[in-house]
Amino acid sequence: MKLAVIGTGYVGLVSGVCFSELGNEVICVDNALSKIELLNKGDVPIHEPGLKELIASNTEAGRLSFTTDLAAAVSASEIIIIAVGTPSLPDGKANLAYIEQAAAEIGRAINGYKVVVVKSTVPVGTNEKVAAIIRNYAAEFFDFASVPEFLREGTAVKDTLNPDRIIIGTESERAAEMLTALHRPLTDQITITDVRSSEMIKYASNAFLATKISFINEIANICEKVGADVEEVAKGMGMDRRIGSSFLKAGIGYGGSCFPKDTQALIQIAGQMDYDFKLLKSVVEVNRDQRFNVIRKLDELLGDVTGRTIGIWGLAFKPETDDVRDAPAFEIMETLLERGALVKAYDPIASSNFERAFDRSEVDYCTSAQEAAEGADALCILTEWKEFINIPLSDVQKWLKTPNLIDGRNIYREEDLEATPFAYYSIGRPKMNNGVKETNPILSF
């Protein structure tokens, strides 16, 4: 099939490239000339494992191209996929300006029957508004559909080529048949539903996953107080098929471009319908507070952080991506600076992106994990990069001024800390001091 993908962010670029890998002819469109020039040179504007290689092979095969000419791309294609950003507005609502602009341009360019697909995450009812905008300009008939994405940054290529399911929301049998044929090479788990339910499925899915994360973090906080191990608790919970083990990893909370944005948007959608989504509001509140556990543990270890040097390992919101949107590191580092700490920070991939967003002269952005740890009074691990996991604790001990370690992602095991001098605080597990696990007082009832 011939496809035009409008928008070359994470969703658009990965989707377009993967569709070309399936043998389709794909034109990826973006109005940012610098990004298109970069892609045409074979470079990739985002860090995503496997993506650069797929771009190179499919471009060479003639199945994949990049352009700023939306009209030409639409005219040459059967299926138009809208994958532009819908960032949050200050009040939490989704900003639909980019998708509305794309709809108008698509309408002016339609030169025959097309299927227009919205893959961007949008509030319920947006597809109908997009279709109305296109109709205002289009002289030809078209169908529209909602096909939400469920990819995860860091594993986006794998998720796109091996999806759990494909949701197609449309009222058109013709569009449903075309989109089923397009996605059938990926999976036979294809569900056809109405447009509004399709839109809601994406928000409901992300809200539920965010709820699981906040729930296990609350359990982790209780585990610390009663002397239980949250990883053992999560393992036992996950063995129940009704619960499942995914998204039950305790830490310092979620970040990125999806969960924070989509939870706030769903709260706003509910509010517009005069419904108070109390559960999801609590999920968001718990998530924000969870990142400050790092500060609380530092206070317990050091007392006052004023004048103390704090090493930070990890700035991306998760490993295998350079995305720093809503990363916990922002609020943690801001709080440390407000309290007069000296901060040394390092990330294998995301340092430059983070520094552009958090350009503070008080922060020493380092070029290695060793540099960030050397001479520090404490080291905080905020992203579970493999590079950090593979560094021997004996090296970390040598680098630090004092062996204080805050493991915000639980990358070390109890046995790793045995026979070491570390004061070790993790998430939802007993503290360790000089290789010995601290025991909590016996509970009285």
Image (cartoon, rainbow, N blue to C red):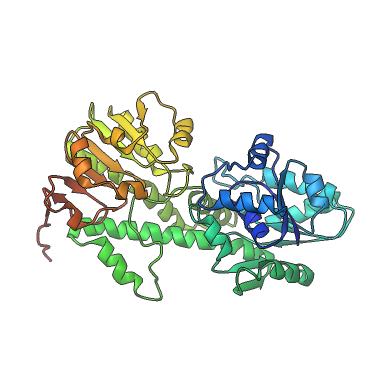
Percent coordinates x, y for residue 355 in the rendering: 44, 32
Task: Specify whether 315 is left or right of 14.
Answer: left
How many marks can you see?
A: 0
Q: Position of residue 287 (x, y in %)?
A: 39, 51
Residue 240 in view: yes
Confirm whether residue 384 shows in the render.
Answer: no
Along the line of sight, the residue nearer the viewer: 98 or 37: 37
Is 222 situated above or below 325? below
Q: Residue at the location (22% across, 31% down)?
A: 375
Q: Could you tell me which residue is drawn at 59 percent across and 57 percent down?
A: 273
Q: Nearer the viewer, residue 115 or 298?
A: 115
- In percent of width and height, residue 222 lies at 25, 58
Left or right, residue 86 beside residue 75: left
Left or right: 394 with respect to 286?
left
Near-viewer residue (12 or 92): 12
Which residue occupies 46% across, 34% down? 352
Looking at the figure, which quarter contains the C terminus? bottom left
Quadrant in the picture for residue 283: bottom left
Residue 160 position within the rendered picture, expressed as x and y whole percent measured from the top left: 57, 60
- Dividing the picture into quadrants, the one containing residue 354 is top left
